[in-house]
Structures are given as structure tokens and as C-alpha cells.
Amino acid sequence: MANESAFENLKLELRRGCLVLAVLAQLRQEHYGYTLRKALTDDGLEIEESTLYPLLRRLETQGLLTSEWREEDKRNKRFYRLSKDGKVILKQLLEEWRSMGESLDRILQEVKV
Amino acid sequence: MNLLNRYLQAVARLLPKARRDDIIAELRANILSQMEDREQELGRPLTEDEQAEILRHHGNPTVIAGRYREGNLGLAFGVQLIGPELFPFYKNILLLNLSLTLLILFPVSLIGRAVFPGVAIPLLAQVSIITLIFTLLDRYKGAVLDKWDPRKLPALKAAVEEGPTARNIFEFIATAVGTVWLALTPWWPYLMLGPGALWIPSLGLKFWPQWPFFYGAIVAVLCADVILRFFSLFRWLPRRRFRVVDLALRGVGILIGVLLYLEGPNYVTSSNAAFADWANSTFRVCIAVAIAIHLWRAGWLLFSLLRERHQMLPARQY
């Protein structure tokens, strides 16, 4: 039981950073909340609505995303897109991600699970 | 969509007022898209149970609202004690308790000259007890917050937008009474001047020749305003359209006011020159005040219209 809880917490921490990276990468193309979630799910990254929609707001507040209300299919929707600053941050995060991945790959090759 | 409206109402209740409409409009659009997708998959409209399942999966309104709050802070001492969902409620309850305690105990302890044990100990005790309660709540929140049923959410409050509000009724009555009063004044000067109206014949008053035109224009604008307020009583105009018409009327009002001001100051002449001076200068001040009020109102309307246009917020629907 304790192990399960510890695993869940660690998994959550591991996912947190990855989600931001995935959302920023996906928003190189414009999306509104629901289609973004679908696109992430289609690529194998499940994310709860209650996590994704507030995350979009936070990233926008940080200046990494821009948004605008627009009508589509007779309904107003808020569309998000990567901002200029967001593109720079995404590039830096991707470099960091690749560097960490290479390091982890090297470390994990020596580990037998 | 009754269930969705009840869900959004429950979330809205816990959101900061400044961002409430915007967040709810976005949630509504996202959830409706999800429901439509599901309907297309099934080839039929969703049942209430299916709608409830989508909402349940979307998340408890308390959790959703907590995640939208600014900062998304929590309380941690090495390990997280209170997560971001409950932290805003923890903070508010703690502040309320501490403020009340200080308000009651501080003056009492000053009289007894025992500030430290008199105030500090109850404060510390409250911080500890409230933190402990919220830590336990946070630890077991999954068991509580996950067990919720959208069908048991509170019913929709009588939509404010559907019927007359106290403010709308007041605005309509005030505008209507003001218009009738101004329209009847030429025939019954008593309405404006009271017993002083008896002196008018002896003053030999003569109005400026263009006065009937301006007076008629003012009364016409006021009549249009009364009609607009009547429409707003029963929401016969969408909010945005109401504001556009209101803004246009304010614009016409400002134009009349400015022209009237520029045509002054000799609006009336009288056999009593001192009285004519006083009446003209008072009238000009009244015009200036009316222009200022209309400008302020027009500016506010313009600002809210531009803001809505930028955000394209739909009318409040919950």
C-alpha cells in the first residue's frame, strides 16, 4: 500500500515536467482545450481535463502561450498557440530533455530491472 | 444541458470573480465539444447518465476550481501537507479565524496587559488545529472528492438574466419618472420650480429661439432610453446589443449637451437681469455635469464592449 502510494507520487512528479513539454510542443499548432487533449491522447499521453485546462492558463500567464476567443462551428472557443517566448523556452527544454534522455539511457543500460 | 449548467454553476461559485466568466465560457465550450464527439460516436443524443459520466470524469467542481486559482500554492514541510486544491480554502478559513480572534482577544488582552499568552497561544492553537484538519482532509480527499455525483449538484439558481432585477426595475422607474417630469415641465412649471413658478409671469422670461428644438431632442433621447430600459426588464435584447444601443444614446446625449453648451450662455432673457444671469450660469453648470455623467457612462460601456469583443465572451448562461 505504502509502495503503491510512493509510486503514484513519484510517477506524478515524473509526469509533471513532461506534460508541460508535451503541451508546449503540441501547441506549435493552434488548438483549443478539447482538441489539444485529444491530440495528446492520440499520441499516447493521457491527461486529465482538470489538469490540462488550468495548465494552459498558467502557461499563458507565464507568457509561453497566447490565446484568442474565436467562433468555430457556431461556438466561441479559446484557441491557444505557442508564443514567441514559448518557442524559445520549448527549444531550450527540448535540448535539456534530449541531454537528460541520453544520460538516462547510459545510466539505465547498466541497470538490470 | 441542465446537468452541465448545474456543474458549471458549482465550479463558478468557487472561482475568483474577475476571471469567472472567462473560465466558465472556456469550460463550457470544451465540455460541449466532448459531449458532441461522444454523440457522434453513438449516433444519438446522450442520456442524462452519459452526460453525468462525462462530468464526473471531468472532475469534482471543488478540485477544478481549486486548480484554476492563482498561484496554485500548497503547504509543505518536506512533504506536502495541503495540496493546491484545498489550499485556497485553508488560507481563507485560517485568515478568517485569525482575524476574528485578533479582533476579539487583542483589546481584551491589552486591558489585561497580557499580550503574549492572551493572544499568541490562541492564535497558535488555531493555526495548528486548522492545519491538522486540512492535512487530514487533503490526505483522505480522494475518498471524499472522488465520490460525487453530478446529478446531486444543487439546482440552478433562478437565472438572474431571465427576469427583472432590482437594479433594472430601479433604472426603468427612475428614467421613466425623470422623462415624464421633464416632458410635463413646460405645461406645469410648478414641477420644476415649486411655489417659485408663481413668480415666472412677473419675471418676463423669454427663451432662446432654438430652445424648443434642443428641448424636443432631449425628451426624445430620454423616451428612447425609457423604451430601452423597458426592453432590458424582460431581457428582450441580448446584453451586448443593449450596451451598443445604450452607447449610441449616450453619444447622442453628449452631442446635444455639447451643442447646447456651446450655444450658451444666453439661454433665457428676463426683465430681471440678475435672475437671468443666475439662471443661465446654473443651467450651463447642469449641462456640464450631464455631459460628464454621460461621458463616464459611455466610456464604461465602450470599455466593456471592447473587452467582450476581445474575449468574445458569450452571455452568462449559468
Image (tube, helix red, strand yellow):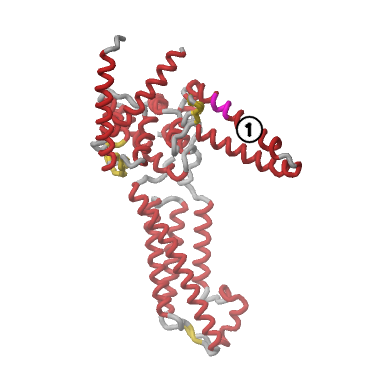
Q: Relative to B282, say whether A13 is above or below.
A: above
B167 or A6: nearer the eye?
A: A6
- Per the rendered image, the range of residues in magenta is B131-135
Q: x, y (%) of residue B136?
A: 55, 23
Q: Residue at x 43, y 13 (%)?
A: A3
Main SS, magenta residues: helix
Q: Secondary structure at mark 1?
A: helix
Q: Residue at x 45, y 28 (%)?
A: B60
Q: Quadrant of the N terminus of chain B?
A: top left
Q: Residue at x 31, y 10 (%)?
A: A113
Q: Is residue B298 left or right of residue B133?
A: left
The residue at which mark 1 appears reads as: B124
The amino acid marked with disc number 1 is: Leu
B42 or A57: nearer the eye?
A: A57
Q: Is residue A9 left or right of residue B122?
A: left
Check residue B180 for magenta coloring: no
Q: Residue at x 66, y 38 (%)?
A: B101
